[in-house]
Amino acid sequence: MKMKSLTLTLGLSGTALAAALVLPAIAQESLLPEGFGKPADTPAPRPTPTPAPSPTPAPGPSPVTGSGTVAPPAVTATVGIPAPAEEGETTEEGEAVEPGTLKYDLPPGARRLLTRIGPLTPETGGLGPDAFGVRGQYAAAIMRKTNGALASRWGQILLRRSLSSAIDTPATINGADLAAERAALLLRMGESNAARSIVQSVDYDRASQRLVSVAQQTFLATADPSGMCSYVPAGLAHGDEQVWRLVSGICAGLSGEAGPAGWAIARVRSSGRISNFDILLAERVLGASAAGRRSTTIEWANVDRLTSWRFGMATATAIPIPAELRASAPAYMRGWTVLAPMTDMSDRIAAAPDAAARGVLSSEAYVSLLSAAAGEEEPPETLVAQTDALRSAFRAANGSDRYTAMAGLWGAEGSPAQRYASLIATARAAAALPTSAEVNEDPWQLLGSMFAGGYDYNAMDWAPKISVGSHAWGVLAVGSPRPLNGTSAGTIGSFSGNDDSADYLRSKFLLAGLAGLGRIDASDAASAAGDLDVDLGKQTRWSRAIMAAAERREPGMVALLAAAGMQGEWAKVPPYHLYHIVRALREVGLDAEARMIAAEALVRV
């Protein structure tokens, strides 16, 4: 019998037309490190690791059928499944409970409202509760249409911070639905821990159908199958019955109920709708529980892709995933891999450069991960060489030797993400380098490394040693806390004379950043724009939307629209997008983020 393909995705459902029209055709990072945006107290600032919370509808399958589809997660905790309410049943508060919904045993004071959802407050690094304004359906539509693959590390850091903030739910949308879209976008960004924090900010009996679906993907991404157990009744009622029946079997087994677990899995297998490989993964989880009675062998020979079900179940039970499947998996899974501590260290290290370049890992978290891997038995020679060079970058006897060690890391062969990750790894060492050290004539990588970690004031100390018109000068001109003197069309012309990027994109980004920050006279900007043949004032529905959000003083919406305007690679981001992004961020008080994004653009093209 031909098996029906079962694929659960973080898909985009029908989206508001207005939101679709606002999104640009092209295609974004963590909390700010300590000392960001203010002078460092010591020569060697220490950044605070980005919180690791975490996909356009990035496919997040569930159990798979014949060709491979996805299913629910498995866990290690003993969790019971809540029972559905009976006819006429009431809560402890005396409220009537709709038949079929979940009974909830928490006292009224422990319940959480849907009117404000999210873990971060302004006191803990989040945005204000009104950051996304009052158009809830519009915000949700933009979230659904944003694919999570952002050009800017700092853009992702800001968006994660925005989506994780405790924001008021607009009257135009159900709070659980908006939470679902926030968590789904975080998953597509690779921010699995942040997505989990949003899902768990909503009591499970108040979860909407959309949130139940996203919760399944979230607990798969964090390799915690037991997290789905609370959602089983709702999943059976409104989701894919066979998938949730398989999850119910897992949860029964995790609660020590071998009989119901075996019956549920046998029924799913007889339906023929879920691939046997995915059922075996569920049985492997049960084998590790109190209800497990036999060992299950997992063979990947005929598996052609890594789904979220397979990722979550295999990671939860420490089953090695073949390298070729990891290599062909969606990019956001590399973020999930790095954030899952039960994953084999070699797999986390392989995924770490991309996660750092995306913004999933802070500079300190990335260095700590490399150090931990190097401390294991028989680490790879390449890793040992990398950590030795990092050690020299931090601890060599003099500044020149430290710079030489850093330059060696920056010049190593690798992908663009790996090269940028090397700048991130050395951020703190670069910030601590004395200005008396001998460096290259154009130390743009040194400044780029500082800005990658948010050490803007440390970078400013190098201004007297930078040649006007050099690559380093351009990075500093947009990234420094204070404007540089003498910025004009002439200095931009000198910069473009040394520009080796395709179609002078770096020079166009420089002009866009300076103009957006208000650091160049309007006549000089117009003159430079004419020389570079670029129209920064170009108007589209997206540009009008982001500037309107800035006028309404909605920093969360500005951050979201900025991310929508930076999807894909930097090479595909139009200069006028960068101009509007920087200008809008500055107008809503996010000056530091605006400068970091502009500086990053000049470093990465």
Image (cartoon, rainbow, N blue to C red):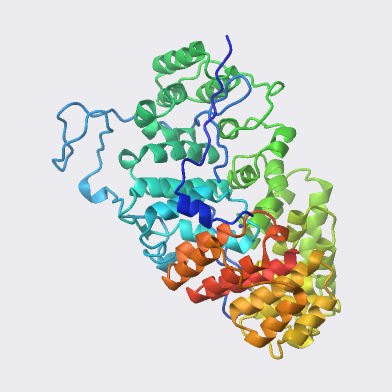
Specify the quadrant of the image occupied by residue 238. top left
Question: In this orientation, which residue lies closer to the viewer: 380 or 414?
Answer: 414
**Residue at x 46%, y 56% (from the top left corner):** 164
Question: Which image quadrant: the N terminus?
Answer: top right
Specify the quadrant of the image occupied by residue 223. top right
In the figure, 44 relative to 255: above or below?
below
- In the rendering, at what x and y percent does residue 566 appear? 62, 59
Residue 596 placement, left or right of 353? left
Question: In the displayed image of the protein, which residue is found farthest to the bottom?
Answer: 486
Residue 63 placement, left or right of 420? left
In the figure, 261 relative to 143: above or below?
above
Question: In the displayed image of the protein, which residue is found farthest to the top?
Answer: 1
- In the rendering, at what x and y percent does residue 103 appear? 25, 34
In the figure, 225 relative to 269: above or below?
below
Query: Is any atom of residue 212 visible in this view?
Result: yes
Residue 140 placement, left or right of 330? left
- In the rendering, at what x and y percent does residue 88 appear? 14, 29
- In the rendering, at what x and y percent does residue 39 appear? 59, 81
Query: Is any atom of residue 398 visible in this view?
Result: no
Question: In this orientation, which residue lies closer to the viewer: 537 or 435?
Answer: 537
Specify the quadrant of the image occupied by residue 575. bottom right
**Residue at x 37%, y 34% (from the top left corner):** 230
Question: Which image quadrant: the C terminus?
Answer: bottom right
- Total of numbered circles in the picture? 0
In the figure, 544 relative to 521: above or below?
above
